[in-house]
Image: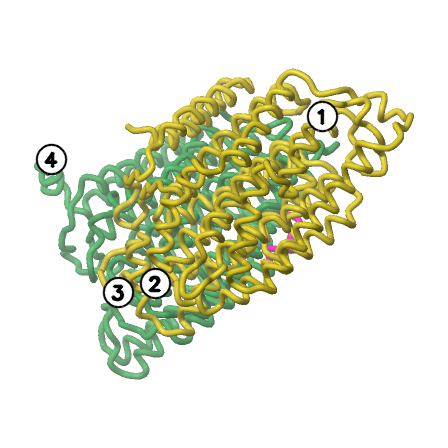
């Protein structure tokens, strides 16, 4: 038993126990233990949990610079979500704890496995707890949003499954055994024809594009993020979106290097489109949560652009570094923003921008944190967002000057919508209304959560080099293939 | 291994079947004379358990009459079918008691039908296949009718008439085969007439399996029958008719992949489009079972592959677990028909039952953590072994669409406020225990599918 296997198993044990011990503390305890053990995961770890040799279903564990930060981000955010669940008002808290522990158990393996079937298994299984979380504790059109989320994600993942199985059947024909190991996939796909490769790649790409989400298939995101409960939004924005972009780096690029090289321009166009389109839509929103949701579309565009920014025949180092770092940044900053919005909503039950004005005077602490995370989201120097976005823009510049310029403009737009939001909600004249009466400043655990997350925002922003050092190992993995 | 040898020496396979049959017949007669229902179900359960034990301990033998193939597939089928019949007897016991409907023949019918189903999976000639098919079907006609309500009668009559027509088709095919080949034995036909005959036999088996376009009886029977009758008939009829089909197709070496691709696609389309507008869950599941028949045909595309036969049994068994489970849940309901609006907010009162319902539906949908996922994966890979992409794409689109109706009961039960006139259910602890065992098995095989394949390791390469 090592740290990684413990990290993998602890949430499962917690899930089972939460059926019998019905208190939210079980979530806190187990997510804290998971978080602690995830800190001890050694980089460069290789291992395997064999669930079915016969069907090629193994969780081949693999940790490098690409996923270690995401694993810690996952366990960390879950710990905060459980901490927050202690203070927030929720019905059916025992089910809430159960489903979130189950969700954590399902998310962690998606980041640590190199076996495509195991990845798919957990990737798809995430739908179950997420469907319940949005559907049971959501607000407004919760059931509609839950369905939209599930059907969109499933739409992508089914074709992913067909692609994966098709490749596996080729592996079977060659070796006489079912295997879904990344290495086998790489060696089999290498010899396929152009069109065949492209079609198979599309199966992968659509699944990840829905999850990330890239522009034409992003429509599930605003609904799901807006209507989900606070914890659900935090996990959705903070972690689930990264599964798509992470899997693109981990699976799509090594398996289909030629296709990515060939079509990187089109993927980049979609990403840039997402950056600008998401930003414009965010400008137009009346609902705070919806605004942040659209900003996610924009920010994930950066991640995707960094992942495909080619220079010569290789993906640019800056772009990759920026993409991986931006995943972490976005997880921290957007997760934090969703926390803060959740805290406001908890008090006033309104997310409409028009209902608020000048609340900085009433909730100075909340305002401070909100501004910190917004600045990181904008990419303000000294916050994590700056480093990530800058690197992506550098990569994009190298790739294609036009992309670089448009992307930089997108960064300005993001400053526009975030600052405009802050201006309207937090500053100006304090309005006297029933809503405002109920508004009081954050305290206790809420402050703790905000402080922890803001520490990370500044840590990445001011001392990026240790993080860069970690990510470097992951980039070598990708460079080996493309 | 020593023990199994001794048992084999003591009773040959036929001996065990006859003993088990006698147990149930004598038990049934005694229960009629003494007017005691308990004797009937106890004897039927013990008769099934005799076969169950035999299927675990027994070993492949040669049948002296050459009519039944007592090979490894027989033992696997016997194990699965008799397990389903034991579960169904207990579930129907609870349902009949709850609905104050005393019927000793119900249990005897379940046993009798399971015996027919077991023989049907292993018939070596067309005559045995026909007789065992009828032995399986007739008790089910009666079980569907046993509550004597309007929809039950309608369903039973529809099933019976349609079944009779397809029995005729079978017989026509059988006689063509006999005329052309001069043998009862299932074998590769040499004449065109024999080939035509085999196709007719296959149609009759597809009818039993509920494959479109021979599916029209399925929704009515699933809806009209007592729920606990479907906990038996749903899994077992599908299992035995598809295994029989597997044998027939494999032995006769019929070219199955060409025209049958169309059957698979039609089944998926009919099943999914039929299920989407349904307001009643049993009917919804019935339509979904038609679409599952479509997925089952995928396995025939690469039938020559030994592994595919194992995959096929996995699909049938796990599909059966989910069907038995979900109809087990319905058997707890007071009303025969379970409308979607009636289970709104069901989880506030019966959280565990709703949870079980969700597990079975998720398995039907083929989402991971349940065995349904591996079933879907195996059906896809079986089709892709021989590059049958188009049916797989239909299957993929179908499984996206199916999410909508499979999640409908789940979202109604868990996510909406409680309905005013909700369904009333009776919690029979033992039934709930059995249903949760089924759910647990689904989750267990969904994470460790290997164990199932260990269980059925001995399925032979060819028959």
Q: Are marks 3 and 4 on the same chain?
A: no
Q: Quadrant of the N terminus of chain B?
A: top left
Point 19% across, 44% down: residue: B15
- Mark 1 or mark 4, whichever is nearer to me: 1
Shade representing chain B: green
**Closer to us: mark 3 or mark 4?**
3
Q: How far apart are marks 1 and 2 (CA)?
A: 68 Å
Residue identifier under label 4: B3
- Name the residue tied to disc 1: A366
Report the magenta residues as a range: B274-280
Give the alpha-carbon distance from disc 3 to disc 4, as whole Å.
40 Å
Residue that label 2 marks: B245
User: Which of labels 3 and 1 is toward the front?
Assistant: 1
Q: Say yes or no: labels 2 and 3 on the same chain.
A: no
Task: State whether residue A20 appears in this view.
Answer: yes
Crowding at mark 3 (Cα within 10 Å: few <14, some 14-19, many 20+)? few
**Residue in front for this viewpoint, B285 or B305:** B305
Residue furthest to the bottom: B192
Foreground of the two, B325 or B53: B325
Chain letter of the yellow region: A
Seen in the picture, residue B408 relative to B430 is either above or below; the reply is below
The chain containing the residue under callout 3 comes to A
For label 3, the residue is A173
Q: Is residue A34 above or below residue A373?
A: above
Q: For residue A84, what is the image quadrant?
A: top right
At which x and y percent is residue A387? 55, 43
Residue at the spot 33% in from the left edge and 72% down from the top edge: B174
Left/right of residue B89 with respect to residue A459 in the rendered view: left
Sequence-first tag of 4 and 2: 4
Residue B363 on image: x %, y %? 47, 45
Report the residue at 52% width, 49% height from top. A391
């Amino acid at each position: 038993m090592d740290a990684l296997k413990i990290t993998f198993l602890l949430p499962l044990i917690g899930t089972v126990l939460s059926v019998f011990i019905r208190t939210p503390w079980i979530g806190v305890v187990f997510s804290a233990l998971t978080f602690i053990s995830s800190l001890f995961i050694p980089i460069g770890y290789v291992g395997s949990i064999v669930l079915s040799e016969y069907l090629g279903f193994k969780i081949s564990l693999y940790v490098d610079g690409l996923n270690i930060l995401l694993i810690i981000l996952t366990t960390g955010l879950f710990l905060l979500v459980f901490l927050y669940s202690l203070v927030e008002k929720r019905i059916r808290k025992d089910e809430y704890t159960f489903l979130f522990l189950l969700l954590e158990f399902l998310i962690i393996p998606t980041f640590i496995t190199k076996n495509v079937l195991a990845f798919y298994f957990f990737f798809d299984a995430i739908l179950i707890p997420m469907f319940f979380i949005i559907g049971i504790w959501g607000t407004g059109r919760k059931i509609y949003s839950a369905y939209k989320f599930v059907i969109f994600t499933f739409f992508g993942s089914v074709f992913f499954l067909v692609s994966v199985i098709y490749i596996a059947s080729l592996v079977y024909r060659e070796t006489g055994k079912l295997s879904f190991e990344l290495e086998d996939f790489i060696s089999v796909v290498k010899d396929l024809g152009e069109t065949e490769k492209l079609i198979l790649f599309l199966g992968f790409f659509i699944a990840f594009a829905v999850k990330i989400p890239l522009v034409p298939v992003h429509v599930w995101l605003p609904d799901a993020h807006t209507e989900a409960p606070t914890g659900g939004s935090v996990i959705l924005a903070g972690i689930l979106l990264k599964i798509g972009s992470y899997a693109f780096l981990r699976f799509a690029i090594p398996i289909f290097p030629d296709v990515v090289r060939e079509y990187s321009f089109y993927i980049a166009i979609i990403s840039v489109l997402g950056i600008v389109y998401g930003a414009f839509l965010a400008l137009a929103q009346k609902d705070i949560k919806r605004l942040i949701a659209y900003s996610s579309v924009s920010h994930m565009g950066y991640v995707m652009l960094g992942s495909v920014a080619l220079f010569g025949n290789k993906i640019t180092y800056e772009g990759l570094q920026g993409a991986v770092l931006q995943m972490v940044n976005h997880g921290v900053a957007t997760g934090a923003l969703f926390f803060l919005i959740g805290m406001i909503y908890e008090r006033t039950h309104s997310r409409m921008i028009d209902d608020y004005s000048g609340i900085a005077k009433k909730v100075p602490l909340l305002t401070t944190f909100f501004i910190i995370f917004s600045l990181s989201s904008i990419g303000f120097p000294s916050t994590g967002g700056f480093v990530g976005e800058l690197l992506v823009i550098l990569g994009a510049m190298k790739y294609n000057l036009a992309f670089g310029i448009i992307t930089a403009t997108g960064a300005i737009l993001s400053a526009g919508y975030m600052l405009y939001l802050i201006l309207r909600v937090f500053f100006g004249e304090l309005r006297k209304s029933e809503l405002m009466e109920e508004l009081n400043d954050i305290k206790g655990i809420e402050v703790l959560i905000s402080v922890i997350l803001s520490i990370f925002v500044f840590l990445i922003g001011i001392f990026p080099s240790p993080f860069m050092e970690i990510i470097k190992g992951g980039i070598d993995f990708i460079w080996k293939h493309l | 291994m020593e023990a199994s040898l001794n048992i084999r020496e003591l009773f040959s396979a036929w001996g065990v079947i006859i003993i088990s049959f006698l147990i149930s017949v004598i038990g049934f007669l005694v229960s009629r004379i003494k007017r005691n229902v308990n004797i009937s179900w106890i004897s039927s359960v013990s008769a099934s358990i005799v076969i169950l034990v035999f299927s675990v301990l027994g070993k492949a033998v040669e049948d002296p009459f050459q009519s039944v193939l007592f090979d490894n597939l027989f033992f696997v089928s016997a194990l699965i079918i008799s397990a389903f019949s034991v579960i169904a007897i207990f579930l129907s016991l609870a349902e009949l008691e709850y609905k104050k409907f005393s019927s000793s023949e119900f249990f005897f019918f379940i046993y009798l039908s399971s015996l027919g189903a077991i023989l049907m999976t292993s018939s070596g000639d067309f005559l045995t296949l026909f007789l065992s098919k009828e032995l399986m079907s007739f008790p089910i006609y009666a079980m569907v009718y046993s509550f004597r309500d309007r929809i039950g009668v309608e369903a039973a009559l529809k099933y019976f008439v349609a079944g009779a027509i397809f029995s005729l088709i079978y017989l026509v095919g059988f006689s063509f085969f006999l005329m052309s080949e001069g043998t009862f034995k299932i074998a590769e036909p040499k004449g065109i007439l024999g080939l035509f005959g085999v196709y007719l036999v296959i149609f009759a088996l597809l009818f039993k399996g509920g494959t479109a376009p021979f599916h029209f009886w399925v929704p009515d029977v699933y809806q009209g029958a007592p729920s606990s009758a479907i906990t038996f008939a749903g899994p077992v009829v599908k299992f035995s008719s598809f295994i029989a089909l597997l044998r027939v197709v494999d032995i006769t070496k019929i070219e199955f992949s060409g025209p049958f691709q169309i059957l698979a696609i039609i089944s998926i389309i009919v099943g999914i489009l039929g299920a989407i507008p349904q307001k009643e869950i049993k009917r919804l599941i019935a339509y979904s079972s038609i679409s599952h028949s479509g997925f089952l045909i995928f396995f025939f595309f690469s039938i020559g592959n030994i592994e595919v036969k194992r995959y096929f049994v996995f699909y049938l068994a796990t599909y059966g677990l989910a069907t038995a489970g979900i109809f087990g849940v319905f058997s707890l309901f007071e009303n025969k028909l379970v409308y979607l609006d009636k289970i709104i907010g069901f989880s506030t009162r019966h959280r565990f039952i709703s949870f079980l319902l969700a597990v079975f539906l998720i398995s039907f949908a083929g989402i991971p953590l349940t065995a349904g996922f591996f079933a879907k994966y195996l059906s896809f890979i079986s089709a892709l072994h021989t590059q049958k992409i188009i049916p797989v794409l239909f299957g993929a689109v179908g499984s996206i669409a199916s999410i909508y109706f499979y999640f409908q009961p789940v979202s109604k039960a868990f996510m909406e406020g409680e309905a005013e006139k909700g369904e009333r259910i009776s919690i029979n602890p033992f039934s709930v225990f059995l249903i949760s065992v089924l759910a647990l098995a689904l989750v267990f095989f969904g994470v460790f599918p290997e164990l199932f394949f260990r269980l059925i390791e001995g399925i032979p390469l060819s028959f």
